Amino acid sequence: MHNPQLNANGELQHLLSIEGLPREILTQILDTAESFAGVTEREVKKVPLLRGKSVFNLFFEPSTRTRTTFEIAAKRLSADVINLNIAISSQTKGESLLDTVANLSAMQADIFVVRHASSGAPFLIARHVKPHEHVVNAGDGRHAHPTQGLLDLFTIRHYKKDFGKLTVAIVGDILHSRVARSLIHGLTTLGAPEVRVIGPQTLLPAGVEALGVRVFHDMREGLRGADVVVMLRLQNERMGGALLPSAQEFNKHYGLSADKLALAKPDAIVMHPGTMNRGVEIDSSVADGPHSVILPQVPFGIAVRMAVMSIVAGN
Amino acid sequence: MKLHIKNGRVVDPATGKDSVGDVYVSDGKISESFSKAEKTIDAKGLVVAPGFIDLAVRLREPGQEYKATLESEMDAAVAGGVTSLACPPDTDPPLDEPGLVDMLRRRAKALTRARVYPVGALTVKLEGVGLTEMGQLAEAGCVAFSQANAPLADTQVLWRALQYAATFGFPVWLRAEDVWLAKGGVAHDGEVATRLGLPGIPSFAETIALGTILELVRATGARVHLCRLSTAGAVELVRRAKAERLPVTCDVSVHHVHLCDVDLGYFDSHCRLEPPLRSQRDRDALARGLADGAVDCLCSDHTPVDEDGKHRPFAEAEPGATGLELLLPLALKWGAAHKLALPATLARITSEPAKVLGVASGRIAPGAPGDLAIFDPNAMVRIAPETLKSQGKNTPFLGHELAGRVRYTVVAGNVVYEA
């Protein structure tokens, strides 16, 4: 099957999912991000790589953090950025997704950064854009959030250097998490020997082992010897239904506390993709503690998004 | 009209006959030989079979003419060699009133192409609450009663509906799907859905609902036809129910014997179907079940959807695929894969569905309706928007080349299609 992310030369045309990307492209993105990490610390935080190009932030689902980091990344590449909060405009008027994109395309877009509540929406858009236009997935349904996955990989590489010996534990709501799926594909592609997912059966998708992970229901067992602990955000709407009885009970079994973290390696790092629920999936003592790399993840996210946009625009 | 079809390979699945010979039709019926034909078809090198009978064809009338019209879909039917078809009640409004059924039948009849057998709504507006006037609907021409793909969550209503239908001997056609377990799902709950991040429908949504239906059949004696099985577990349940001599029959769609969830690829909305495409194991069990008789019929589950309905993210896309013109090629492909003789293959789209419908067609014998499909089993058909007569161009098989080209379709002795 033709990989819709790659052009005829096997280069990155769109970034839709980490799944199916060769290791060389992932490494290229991470290396490029490395070179941009310096830019963000300079006094003049701009490079002219995307000068004259237009980046459309198409957010069909509300987001502040991801949209902002894409916007900063695009501006640091000297692109013009247009933010469209479509969740409250054309979609409510009944315009179809492809009509919206066709309209914006007529305004000379170069890159579409797309977030959508439906899995696969960026693939549909990528199939219909013009050859010089690029689509970057900023999160689609439960499917993928590749730039978040890449920034997680960047963070892990930054602190742990080599993926070849790592045990990574991903904890919480795997079922609904596009972040988890993207990170799992990235880790398996880059050769991390042990990727674990930890959660109750209600929050693990069917046949998740097929993604190349080991499943744990007991968090203590799952954290034992881990080099990297990734906590996922537990959304409030999951609570109180048939998935979970309460936040308190979830915290008791799957919240990251200092004593549970003590089972991981002494130099383990703790990550979180953002919008933490303190006291639910993570205790403040851990979130603010010495193992936490949650805040450094944020500027890495900008560097990674700069890398992705500059690479697709150059191909 | 006296029609003489000569030198064809005559295949009658009802008797297993497969030999070169002539077929005669007069006064709309298969007849003994006669000398003065008004029209002669030279069928040398072609197969002469009973016209195909498709148990699930959405004609989209009334109410959804933007997706397809009776004209377009009846053209598609005869182009696919389909001479009889049953249409589910999920039109807009649903077929829950005798007037609607009557209108549909008269419109269909005026087009003089395939025979249309409406399946009436089991409950008013398909809402799963109150029973329809089954007696009057049957008088208007409904051959069975069904919920189509609409949920029937209330098992008490289902029980009452089966009791009522059994009282009068009306067949009930049901798709087995537990409403709650299927809620929100758009793909088979398995590795592929997990990878694509699509909400899943577990296999047991079908087997649990099927268990309920079979238990109610035991209790009521209602004659039930199970539509579009999708799981290996369901095939086993039906096999056991038949061994127990419960009055059940079942069908499977052409899509489910050839495709599985892996075919979703990168969110191909043509593979957004109801029920969802399941695992390879399920697909193989369905195809085998169809070969060994556990599954009675193969249907196209013809569902024309317009482009706007498919040009959406997978979960939001309208489910269904066009199928009338693929029924023969996909039946032949399935039969060849299972090394079945041609009569056995064609039985699944002729004599077996005729039994389910309770009609005299589906066989080539003097006195039977003069419905025939004459086709070249080896000629290739390219599946493309421009070659499909159906208004729906939505099929996972777009771009495929499949063997089996219909050359003539005869309904009641009239040649209604010729290519």
Image (spheres, grey):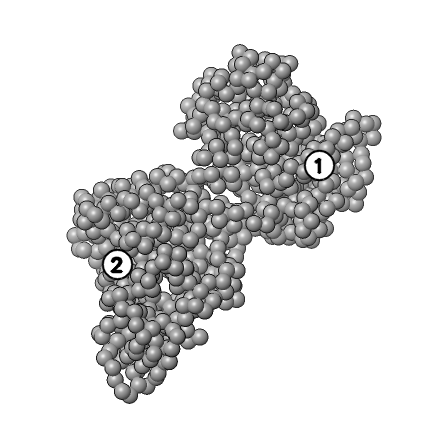
* Image coords of residue B360 (percent x, y): 23, 67
Name of the residue lying farthest toward the left: B167
- Taking B369 as reference, is B267 left or right? right
Residue at figure coordinates x 27%, y 63% from the top left: B351
- Taking B164 as reference, is B392 left or right? right
State whether residue B127 is above or below residue A235.
below
Give the quarter of the figure containing the N terminus of chain B.
bottom left
Crowd band around label 2 with a 10 angstrom C-alpha radius: few (<14), some (14–19), many (20+) = many
Q: Is residue A219 visible?
A: yes
Question: How far apart are the two marked residues, 2 and 1, measured between alpha carbons?
Answer: 61 Å
**Residue under pointer 2:** B356
* Image coords of residue B125 (percent x, y): 33, 52
Quarter of the rendering containing residue B376: bottom left
**Residue under pointer 1:** A28
Q: Amino acid at mark 1?
A: Gln
Seen from the viewer's position, the closer of residues B141 and B293 is B293
Chain of the residue on which disc 2 is drawn = B
- Taking A107 as reference, is B273 left or right? left
Crowd band around label 1 with a 10 angstrom C-alpha radius: few (<14), some (14–19), many (20+) = some
Quarter of the rendering containing residue B181: top left
Q: Is residue B63 visible?
A: no
Residue at figure coordinates x 61%, y 18% from the top left: A268
Q: Amino acid at mark 2?
A: Val
Q: Secondary structure at mark 2?
A: helix
Give the quarter of the figure containing the C terminus of chain B.
bottom left
Q: Secondary structure at mark 1?
A: helix
Q: Nearer the viewer, mark 2 or mark 1?
A: 1
* Image coords of residue B124 (percent x, y): 30, 51
Residue at figure coordinates x 46%, y 20% from the top left: A218
Q: Are marks 2 and 1 on the same chain?
A: no
Chain of the residue on which disc 1 is drawn = A
